[in-house]
Image (cartoon, coloured by chain):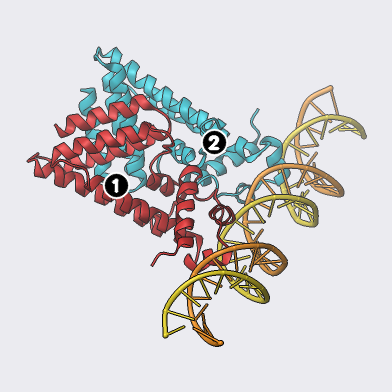
Chain colours: A red, B cyan, C yellow, D orange
DNA sequence: CCGACTCTAGACAGACCTGTCTGCTATTGT
DNA sequence: ACAATAGCAGACAGGTCTGTCTAGAGTCGG
């Protein structure tokens, strides 16, 4: 189903979009670094926006798999998730949340890119609420909202190289889940 | 010292940069909406980056004045600040934090734009720490880190139209200050 | 009244952008 | 063997971007 050229395009776009932003990276550069002809690119992706959406959708699926595959149930998994997020946010090559970075470049809230971002956030919020409820926490919905907000803060702080704020956010999330 | 043309340029740039992003708004549009000739623009701002930095510096000064002029001392003012931030984040025309939005468009952490963003965040963190210390809170530094992270989360959530997350963030900040 | 200064209007260069199109080659299924 | 498919290479059009430049109009202090 997925051709090697398409996969190379998506991988290259993922790397460049995340590292340098969506608007600053042009099609020419993506096809050059992917080693793909321009006509081939436009065969697989009718427009650049399509590629951006594919990039975010793939990232969404990747995170979903990663977080849902973590061991533990209920708040135990919440703790694992935030510990992992904190480590990633301080790790090399971290440049913030791909969804938040993309949203900052697409001001129109009705744009498909923004809809993927909204989907991602709703999924994360629901995951938090389910895990909290599974451990019998009251106010699971409100706590899930706060965990989502802390997640955003971790991504921002990590992307700006503020490791002490990341540590504070992880601690707060662990307290909230405990 | 500041000419009317320069002020008009900066005001127009502030409006457009905040509403639509830095890279998507071109010089031509700014000078057209400001009613200023191109040569005049390049006389006041040698390059577009200069205008971006002036935009952020002015926003920095504006927020600094606004928050430092709020009544109350210590944690009382922290509470006022986060209540205000929460209201603004849910208000009309809110499109996220101008510093975080700009940072997302400038990946190089050494870029002058990023340095202004870092300055702003350090000021906010220091303000929080001072206010907490003034009220005799222990772990003022750690709490200030968390308040900064919550501030980031408020801006992100508000910018994405997530009012419930904003409310959760404000509640958490008030609890933290109490 | 004059020289310095600020501003307007807009042409222009050079680069870069997206997206289309034409040829050509290699592979693969029937 | 042959047709269909996938891909490569690159020219091209039409637009937008930043930044420079020319030419002239208005203003104000001395």
Residue bearing mark 2:
B55
Q: Position of residue B148 (x, y in %)?
A: 34, 28
Q: Is residue D4 above or below residue A78?
A: below
Q: Is residue B102 above or below residue A107?
A: above
Q: Is residue A55 visible?
A: yes
Task: Tell me the element at label 1.
Answer: loop
Q: Is residue B95 above or below residue A32?
A: above
In the picture provided, is B7 more to the left or to the right than A4? right
- Residue placed farthest to the left in the image? A136
Quadrant where the image shows the C terminus of chain A: top left
Q: Is residue D7 above or below residue B149?
A: below
In the picture provided, is A11 more to the left or to the right than B70? right
In the picture provided, is A40 more to the left or to the right than A92? right
In space, the residues marked 1 and 2 are separated at their CA atoms by 26 Å
Return the residue nearer the eye: A114 or B31.
Answer: A114
Return the residue nearer the eye: B68 or A65.
Answer: A65
Task: Tell me the element at label 2.
Answer: helix
Mark sitting earlier along the chain (1/2) = 2
Q: Where is residue A75 in the image (x, y as percent from the top left)?
A: 14, 38
Quadrant where the image shows the N terminus of chain A: bottom left
Packing grade of label 2 (10 A; few <14, some 14-19, many >=20) is many
Q: Residue A102 carries which label?
A: none
Residue bearing mark 1:
B162
Residue at horizontal 53%, vertical 35%? B108
Q: Position of residue C30 (x, y in %)?
A: 42, 85
């Amino acid at each position: 189903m997925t051709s090697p050229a398409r996969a190379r395009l998506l991988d290259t776009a993922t790397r460049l979009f995340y590292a340098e932003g969506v608007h600053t990276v042009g099609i020419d550069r993506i096809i050059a670094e992917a080693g793909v002809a321009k006509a081939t690119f436009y065969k697989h992706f009718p427009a650049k926006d399509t590629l951006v959406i594919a990039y975010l959708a793939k990232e969404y699926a990747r995170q979903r798999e990663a977080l849902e595959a973590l061991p533990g149930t209920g708040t135990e998994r919440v703790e694992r998730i935030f510990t992992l997020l904190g480590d990633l946010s301080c790790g090399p090559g971290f440049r913030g949340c791909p969804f938040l970075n993309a949203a900052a470049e697409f001001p129109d809230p009705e744009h498909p890119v923004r809809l993927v971002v909204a989907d991602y956030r709703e999924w994360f919020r629901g995951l938090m609420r389910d895990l909290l409820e599974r451990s019998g926490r009251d106010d699971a919905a409100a706590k899930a909202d706060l965990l989502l907000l802390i997640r955003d803060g971790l991504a921002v702080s990590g992307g700006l190289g503020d490791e002490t704020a990341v540590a504070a956010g992880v601690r707060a999330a662990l307290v909230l889940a405990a």
